[in-house]
Image (tube, grey):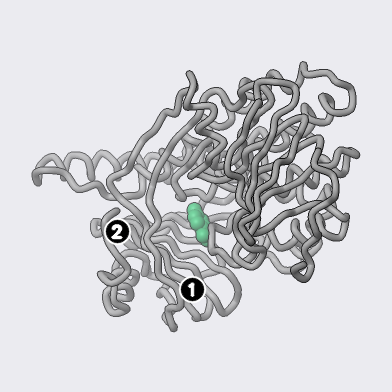
């Protein structure tokens, strides 16, 4: 048995089988436990991989409240940076969006893997079942009362877990989603003609709040991880590779795009470089029979605005009470409306991520005059937003608060 990881229970049945130990899967198993419903989380990666993979880092107010309310917000409250605004920089001219003024709320800069570390520790200390290094190979009978999850462990042995309900929280390459879209489910998609080049930098913090910078050369985002580790992104071509971004090019572009009268991007050793693809996708419905999907398995948002984890948490708040009602009272009225309760919020978030992305990135066009048209229209839209109270408030409200379902 691996240190800190619970061994497989003798039982081969669980009320709720959850595929994937990401934010959605772990939070669901935690919420179910708090309501007296046990579950098994099956994760193909090792605990170490789950706890170290670099992802985005912004928690909106609903997510912060959820973590606090359910007893996993202690380290967040101790360590996270609280931001009451962001800065939008347009070719070196900075405009602050004041969240506190427009919404009375804030966001926390607390990376996704830290949330996962806290949730895993809590699940294990509550004797929860989280099976790492275990791959789900297929799901059967999810349209019957007794779905079955087939899985393979690291040593290659295969077994079956039967469940009352199965939840696919297995990320954007989801196996479980295919059981929904493979029949008559729809997956609606949009691809973007740009991507982000993300890097981790050992340097002092550039500015007290995040900077979203747009410039004729492209977008840049100045974010942070701690006082001495910074997270920077540069708009790049989706086909770029890290080899095309030597350090000199990175620093030249970061200064060009994000420096302003009051800010100079701080430099240091670059420890991680990766290209992040931009995609939007929504699956409808998010349920078939006794199989439900949540988080990235159901929908993907581009990273601008860092909504992915927050959307996953909101899905789970919509799903968990329905599962509790179904398992404890054998009533499915709440569960059966999961898709219709979740999707309006998913589409609003999809819109916000798309809007922020298209307003801040420069899009190459076939000819110079078409490019000039689109750039000037985009800059006029951005200027309309940042130069009026109504525009700044609209952005702030969407960045900070959503109609997070109550749990
Ligand atoms: C991040 O810190 O990774 C981050 C922050 C804000 C975003 C996207 C990513 O909009």
Furthest-front residue in this view: 157
| Residue nearer the viewer, 329 or 74 | 329
The reply to whether the residue tagged 2 has its Cβ within 8 angstroms of ligand 1 is no
Residue 206 is marked as: 1
Q: Residues within 10 Å of mark 1 (few under 14, many from 20)?
A: many
Q: Residues within 10 Å of mark 2 (few under 14, many from 20)?
A: many
Q: For residue 130, which quarter of the picture?
A: bottom right
| Residue nearer the viewer, 164 or 192 | 164
Residue 92: image x %, image y %? 34, 63
Contact between marks 1 and 2 (CB within 8 A): the answer is no
Residue 236 is marked as: 2
State how far apart marks 1 and 2 are (Cα): 21 Å
Quadrant into which the N terminus falls: bottom right
Q: Where 329 falls versus 299 (above or below)?
A: above
Which mark lies nearer to you, 1 or 2? Answer: 2
Residue 120: image x %, image y %? 75, 58
Q: Where 133 falls versus 165 (above or below)?
A: below
Q: For residue 374, which quarter of the picture?
A: top left
Q: Is residue 182 left or right of residue 132?
A: left
Secondary structure of the residue carrying numbered label 2: strand
Q: Residue at x 25, y 69 (%)?
A: 244
| Residue nearer the viewer, 124 or 193 | 124
Furthest-bottom residue in this view: 269
The reply to whether the residue tagged 1 has its Cβ within 8 angstroms of ligand 1 is no
Q: Residue at x 17, y 39 (%)?
A: 373
Residue 8: image x %, image y %? 79, 54
Q: Is residue 103 left or right of residue 392?
A: right
């Amino acid at each position: 048995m691996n240190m800190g990881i619970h061994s497989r229970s003798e039982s081969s049945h669980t009320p709720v089988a959850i595929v994937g130990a990401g934010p959605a899967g772990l939070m669901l198993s935690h919420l179910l436990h708090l309501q007296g419903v046990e579950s098994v989380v099956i994760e193909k990666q090792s605990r170490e991989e789950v706890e170290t993979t670099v992802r985005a880092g912004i928690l909106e107010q609903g997510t912060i409240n959820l973590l606090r309310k359910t007893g996993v917000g202690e380290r967040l409250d101790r360590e996270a940076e609280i931001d009451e605004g962001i800065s939008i920089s347009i070719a070196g001219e900075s405009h602050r969006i004041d969240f506190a003024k427009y919404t009375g709320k804030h966001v926390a800069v607390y990376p996704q893997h830290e949330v996962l570390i806290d949730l895993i520790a809590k699940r294990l200390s509550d004797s929860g079942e989280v099976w790492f290094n275990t791959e789900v190979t297929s799901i059967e009978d999810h349209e019957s009362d007794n779905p079955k999850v087939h899985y393979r462990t690291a040593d290659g042995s295969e077994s079956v877990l039967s469940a009352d309900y199965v939840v696919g929280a297995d990320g954007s390459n989801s196996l479980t989603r295919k059981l929904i879209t493979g029949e008559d489910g729809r997956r609606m998609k949009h691809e973007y003609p740009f991507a982000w080049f993300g890097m981790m930098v050992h340097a002092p913090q550039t500015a007290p709040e995040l900077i979203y910078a747009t410039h004729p050369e492209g977008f840049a985002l100045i974010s942070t991880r701690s006082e001495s580790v910074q997270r920077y992104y540069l708009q790049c071509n989706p086909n770029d590779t890290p080899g095309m971004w030597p350090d000199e090019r990175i620093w030249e572009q970061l200064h060009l795009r994000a420096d302003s009268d009051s800010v100079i991007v701080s430099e240091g050793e670059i420890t991680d470089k990766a290209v992040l693809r931009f995609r939007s996708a929504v699956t409808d419905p998010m349920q078939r029979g006794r199989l439900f999907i949540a988080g990235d398995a159901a929908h993907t948002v581009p990273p601008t605005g860092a909504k992915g984890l927050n959307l996953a948490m909101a899905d789970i708040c919509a799903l968990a009470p329905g599962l509790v009602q179904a398992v404890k009272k054998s009533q499915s009225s709440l569960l059966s409306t999961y898709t219709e309760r979740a999707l309006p919020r998913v589409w609003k978030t999809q819109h916000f991520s798309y809007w922020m992305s298209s307003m801040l990135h420069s899009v190459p066009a076939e000819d110079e005059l078409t490019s000039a048209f689109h750039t000037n229209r985009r800059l006029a839209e951005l200027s309309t937003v940042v130069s009026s109270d109504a525009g700044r408030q609209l952005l702030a409200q969407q960045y900070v608060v959503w109609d997070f379902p109550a749990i």
